[in-house]
Amino acid sequence: MRVLDSHLHLWDPSRLSYSWLEGPLLARFAAEEAIVARGAGSTTDAGSHAAVFVQADCAPEQYLDEVDWVSSIAEEAGVRGIVAGARLDERGSVEHHLDALRARPLVVGVRHLLQSEPAGFARTDAFVAGARALAARDLSFDACVRGVEQLGDVAALASAVPDLRIVLDHLGKPEIGTADAPRGPEQAWITAISAVAAHPQVACKLSGLPAEAGGSWSAAQVQPFFDVALSVFGPDRLMIGSDWPVSAVTAAGWAGESGTPIDADAVPAWTDAVAGWARSRGIDVDDVLWRNAERFYPLSA
């Protein structure tokens, strides 16, 4: 079974600045750590596991440095594409920044972290202008949002820039509860994600839900959310993403209790959960675990 992880984070606080890192995440997570996290160590077949690196919210002035660092370890880490950081709302400088990114061979897309912005931000004239500049350079946009209001912003952005390829990170971060107290999909989220999926240029990552559960999750708990995504996006616009290492923090780690804060089996467990669900729904597993992401970004051989 081959896996193209569409949402891998890497960082090294000794090289770049990350103001948000704390607790068990305030450590180096680079190529060596990513290889171990896959569960097969150095014996992994180079063709069986690859990844798309997604910007890790370093200091904005270091966005290009982040791309250059990840590019330098990409072969070792199995990274085939980079979703770089960018401030799409910065008129006057965004086009120059996007040109600099476009000149770097591994860059396939951009993420401006919308979850950190107020609702309505993606509808502003400045942001839409930046999104149009992004589309003009044939780069995709990773939309990481929280809440149904920001999902509405993604739908509006897709309407405003119909030639921009957009992928929704983490299913829009719905509230899923915990393994012991699971919550089912709320109608407001279903309605909002359906409006996003109505735009054919938008795809969705099956990713990030372990972090939304605070590290306490089960395969049965996430399946109803996958089912909604399947019903509105269809099987050809869904792709697996590990959200490693963010989604590898255990419940003990989040709560500050004793125990190992990073789950060494997080990536294999998530892969098994997505693959098992896909098989049970009659979906081509290789589409969700590899081909859809490879086609969306797109990635060269």
Image (cartoon, rainbow, N blue to C red):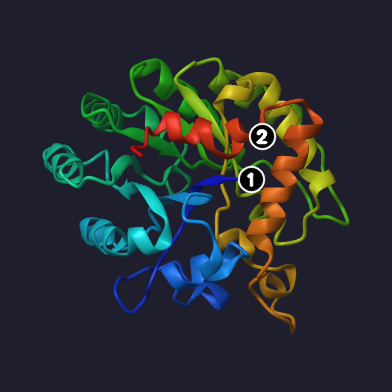
Image position of 209 (left or right of 95): right
Query: What kind of residue is marked 1?
Result: Met
Image position of 252 (left or right of 114): right
Give the secondary structure at mark 2: helix
Task: Place residue 17 in its image quadrant.
Answer: bottom left
Mark 1–mark 2 distance (CA, rounded to whole Å):
9 Å
- Say if residue 250 shows up in the picture: yes
Task: Place residue 123 in its image quadrant.
Answer: top left
Residue 283's place in the image compared with 1, above or below, is above
Query: What kind of residue is marked 2?
Result: Val
Q: Disc 1 vs disc 2: which is toward the camera? A: 1
N-terminal-most mark, 1 or 2 = 1
- Answer few, some or many: residues within 10 Å of disc 2's Cα (few below 14, many 20 plus, some between 14 and 19): many
**Residue topped by disc 1:** 1
- Say if residue 175 shows up in the picture: no
Give the secondary structure at mark 1: loop
**Residue topped by disc 2:** 285
Are dots 1 and 2 in contact, CB under 8 Å? Answer: yes
Instruction: Identify the residue at horizontal 72%, vertical 56% (top origin).
Output: 269
